[in-house]
Image: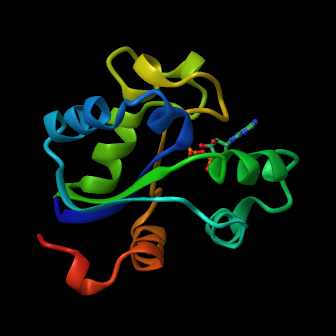
């Protein structure tokens, strides 16, 4: 197994409910280290670009509206097999299908308001990390 970095976003439904610390405790309990973190408000342009892969999907407009509706916390996580390790502790996209003990099972509201984002592959993790962080903001 390799040490990998993955981009996490604590989404507006979670910041609204003051869940940043609770979610960070799940991240750290999963063996992932938070090596960069900042609380920001996404612009509409940023949200559209970040989720550009979904622009043909029926839910794209609602997704962008949701992502700009409040603050988000963007984070870079690092750990053994980090991309899969974070996807595992996040749980399934729809919290109704998420396993017990996952972030989405314990905190998400529905398939859109699902509390967290995590990169899905090494290539997207690298692109998403550089979307939000410069090298001097990352302290591994
Ligand atoms: P994941 O975040 O688990 O990688 P996707 O890449 O499929 O999932 O979707 C990106 C985000 O779009 C989801 O996390 C969720 O916020 C939103 N989303 C996905 N499917 C739906 C849907 N059917 N209706 C509304 N929003 C959705």
Q: Is residue 133 left or right of residue 5?
A: right
Q: Residue at x 58, y 62 (%)?
A: 42
**Residue sitting nearer the eye, 4 or 110:** 110
Q: Is residue 67 left or right of residue 121?
A: right
* Figure label count: 0
**Residue sitting nearer the eye, 102 or 17:** 17
Query: Which quarter of the picture shows residue 35?
Result: bottom left
Q: Position of residue 21 (x, y in %)?
A: 26, 35
Residue 46 versus residue 108 in the image, above or below: below
Q: How is this picture coloured?
A: rainbow
Residue 97 versus residue 81 in the image, above or below: above
Quadrant assignment for the C terminus: bottom left
Q: Position of residue 123 (x, y in %)?
A: 45, 74
Q: Residue furthest bottom?
A: 135
Query: Which quarter of the picture shows residue 138?
Result: bottom left
Query: Which quarter of the picture shows residue 27?
Result: top left
**Ligand 1 - quadrant of the structure image:** top right
Q: Is residue 53 left or right of residue 88?
A: right
Q: Residue at x 80, y 62 (%)?
A: 55
**Residue sitting nearer the eye, 108 or 18:** 18
Q: Residue at x 25, y 39 (%)?
A: 24
Q: Residue at x 50, y 33 (%)?
A: 16
Q: Position of residue 89 (x, y in %)?
A: 33, 34
Quadrant assignment for the N terminus: bottom left
Residue 112 versus residue 52 in the image, above or below: above
Q: Is residue 81 left or right of residue 60?
A: left
Q: Position of residue 125 (x, y in %)?
A: 41, 68
């Amino acid at each position: 197994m390799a040490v990998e970095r993955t981009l996490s976003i604590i989404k507006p439904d979670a910041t609204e409910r003051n869940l940043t610390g609770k979610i960070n405790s799940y991240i750290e309990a999963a063996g992932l280290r938070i090596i960069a973190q900042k609380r920001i408000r996404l612009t509409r342009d940023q949200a559209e670009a970040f989720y550009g892969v979904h622009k043909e999907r029926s839910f794209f407009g609602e997704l962008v509206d949701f992502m700009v509706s409040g603050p988000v916390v963007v984070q870079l996580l690092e750990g053994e097999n980090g991309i899969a390790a974070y996807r595992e502790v996040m749980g399934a996209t729809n919290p109704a299908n998420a396993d017990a003990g996952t972030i989405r099972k314990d905190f998400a509201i529905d398939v859109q308001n699902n509390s967290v984002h995590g990169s899905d592959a090494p290539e997207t993790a690298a692109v998403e990390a550089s979307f939000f962080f410069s090298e001097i903001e990352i302290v591994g």
